[in-house]
Image (cartoon, rainbow, N blue to C red):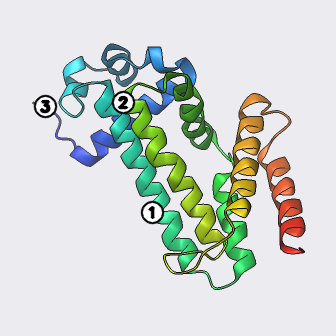
Amino acid sequence: MPRIVDPQERTDEILGAAIKILSEGGFARLTLSNLAKELGGSIRLVTHYFRNREELIHGIVERLTRETDVILDELRSLDDPRERLRRALAWFLLGDLQDTREESVRLALRDHQGDPAVDEFFDVVEPSMRRVLRVALGGDETTEVHESDVDLLRIWTSGIALNAIERPALWTIEHQERALDHLLQVFTSR
């Protein structure tokens, strides 16, 4: 008798495996066949939820968007500007394997811009990251922030993530947190 699986649970499992494959093997390795192998099942297991690679990437975009919505809600609930900024920047740190894999997806996809699914990824994800930083700086639908401040923080978050991926032994979570503390001191003292 077939095992009954919650559709959302299965979708999350497939997307997690897709993120793992993308982060470890790049865009070329993200095939339905490789995904089925990673999951220990048949291609039908995957195609029941995602018909092709484009739908998989769209699913990853939706997953990352949901995660962004959660942090945005949390940030909007914080009254202390320094704590709001600290919490937002801490969200960008790579503290575990899943964080590292998700950030590695961005790196794996960057060389494939021009592919419609990849373009959708960047068209949605990058503005979402900037929205988190804008809200962290106190901006919302009615309050403007300096875009140069958003640029500076986005460069910092991208740089620290790239360093943590390229040199994990040096850029441990503790090192990232020290860098975050220093950035907060510099940024909030001006």
* Mark before the other along the chain sequence, 1 or 2: 1
**Amino acid, disc 3:** Pro
- 112 vs 2: above or below: above
The quadrant in which the N terminus is found is top left
- 14 vs 44: above or below: below
Q: Quadrant of residue 153?
A: bottom right
- 75 vs 99: above or below: below
Alpha-carbon distance for marks 1 and 3?
Answer: 35 Å
What residue is disc 2 on? 116
- 119 vs 99: above or below: above
Q: Residue furthest bottom?
A: 79
Q: Disc 1 or disc 2, which is closer to the eye?
A: 2
Q: Disc 1 or disc 3, which is closer to the eye?
A: 1
Seen at 47% across and 56% down, the residue is 67
Q: Residues within 10 Å of mark 3 (few under 14, many from 20)?
A: few
* Mark before the other along the chain sequence, 2 or 3: 3
The quadrant in which the C terminus is found is bottom right
What residue is disc 1 on? 69
The reply to whether callout 2 and callout 3 are in contact (CB within 8 Å) is no
Seen at 77% across and 48% down, the residue is 173
Secondary structure beneath dot 3 equals loop
Horizontal placement of 25 versus 83: left or right?
left
Q: Quadrant of residue 45?
A: top left
Q: Residues within 10 Å of mark 1 (few under 14, many from 20)?
A: some
Q: Quadrant of residue 32?
A: top left
**Residue 33 position in % (x across, y down):** 32, 14
Horizontal placement of 186 versus 23: left or right?
right
What residue is disc 3 on? 2
Alpha-carbon distance for marks 2 and 3?
Answer: 36 Å
Q: Nearer the viewer, residue 5 or 53?
A: 53
